[in-house]
Amino acid sequence: MTNTKTNVYKMKSNNEPELHHQRNEGIPFDANLFKDININRSAVERRASTLSGRRSVKKEWQAAWLLKALSCIDLTTLAGDDTQGNVLRLCAKAKSPVRSDILDTLGMKDANMHVAAVCVYHNLIADAVKGLGNSGIPIAAVSTGFPAGNIPLSEKIKQIELSVAAGAKEIDIVLSRNLIIQSDWKSLYDEVVACRKACGEAHMKTILATGEISTYTKVSKASWVCMMAGADFIKTSTGKEPVNATLPVSLVMIRAIREYHELTGFKVGFKPAGGISNAKLAINWLILMKEELGNEWLQPNLFRFGASSLLGDIERQLEHFVTGRYSASFRHPMA
């Protein structure tokens, strides 16, 4: 077999952020900025459908893109039967996501590869703190009545404050979907502003739960409201809806990010979550980000995958690249 060690894989560690940008401070509420938005569903879906057909990433380039995807994963466990043991295993995998022999063959043994964050429920933050130690990997906590979000705003604020105090550096909040469905944009803005204040220095990701929003137009307007209110990331889904992240809804949200950046200069991150379970799908999202927002958004500080099983398939595909053989999926456990 030819030597696969090549500089094409060389990339900075996640502990050394490649790009720094000012956090999104938000802007005053102004419905005039988004009131005339009207998304053409068929055009959006037609554009999204071209991604897998027009682009083909193979061999060493595919391996490089998969390593990039790995570095952008929020490795997640949000099951009802989560235990301390599950979380500790998840953290161990987060710190060493790919077998050392595979990384050595790729020339990445000393690259300090790890995922972007570990995402857990509030009651398991302390276990994640213990499992991650001084690795530098942040803890993301789902909050505000995840996944439905149907609790009073005062309770949402309290949950955020408790999660930050427990050690979470990122907070994934659930929006009140009824406000989006009813187009009550000012109330939605006020809610997100209050949550942003409660987060303090912790970065805030706002979950739109797009599978429960009837139109792309409402998705776009909700994205605008969240960014105006100071969201650091906008996120598609909780992973618990009947329909989670899709390329068309992601395209709508990404273009809202681009327009908001052009207007304000603030860069807002994007996180698709739910259903992105294999390497091929992950590459489609990376291509979408590259084509719509450019390389600057292909970094963990501006792009994340919310995923649990994706990492296992990425490791499996990397082994196929270095050996020429596919292995059984159970040889690459997520945690």
Image: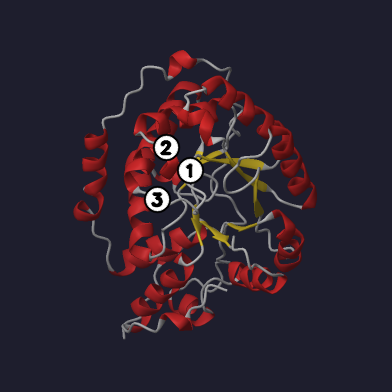
**Residue at 52 percent of width and 78 percent of height:** 99
Instruction: For mark 1, give the secondary structure.
Output: loop
For the residue carrying disc 2, how many other residues have a C-alpha within 10 Å: few (<14), some (14-19), or many (20+)?
some
Vertical position of residue 10 compared to residue 92: above or below: above
Q: Name the residue that disc number 1 marks.
A: 209
In what element is the residue under mark 3?
loop
Look at label 2 and name its amino acid: Ile
Mark 1 in CB contact with mark 3 (< 8 angstroms): no
Residue 315: name its quadrant: bottom left
Where does the C terminus fall, quadrant-wise? Answer: bottom right
Q: Is residue 200 visible?
A: no
Circle 3 is placed at which residue position? 243
- Compare residues 133 and 308 and report the one nearer the observer: 308
Q: Where is residue 50 shown, x and y percent of the image?
A: 21, 48
Disc 2 versus disc 1: distance between alpha carbons?
A: 7 Å
- Disc 1 residue type (three-letter): Ala
- For label 3, the crowd category at 10 Å Cα-Cα, with few meaning under 14, some 14 to 19 and many 20 or more, is some
Q: Are marks 2 and 1 in contact (CB under 8 Å)?
A: yes
Depth order, front residue of 82/111: 82
Residue positioned 47% across, 32% down in the render: 223
At x 35%, y 79%, the residue is 320
The CA span between labels 1 and 3 is 9 Å
Which three-letter amino acid code belongs to the residue tagged 3? Val
252 vs 86, left or right, is left
Mark 2 lies on a secondary structure that is loop
Distance between the alpha carbons at the discs numbered 3 and 2: 10 Å
**Residue located beneath label 2 in the image:** 213
Q: Where is 90 relative to 122, above or below?
A: below
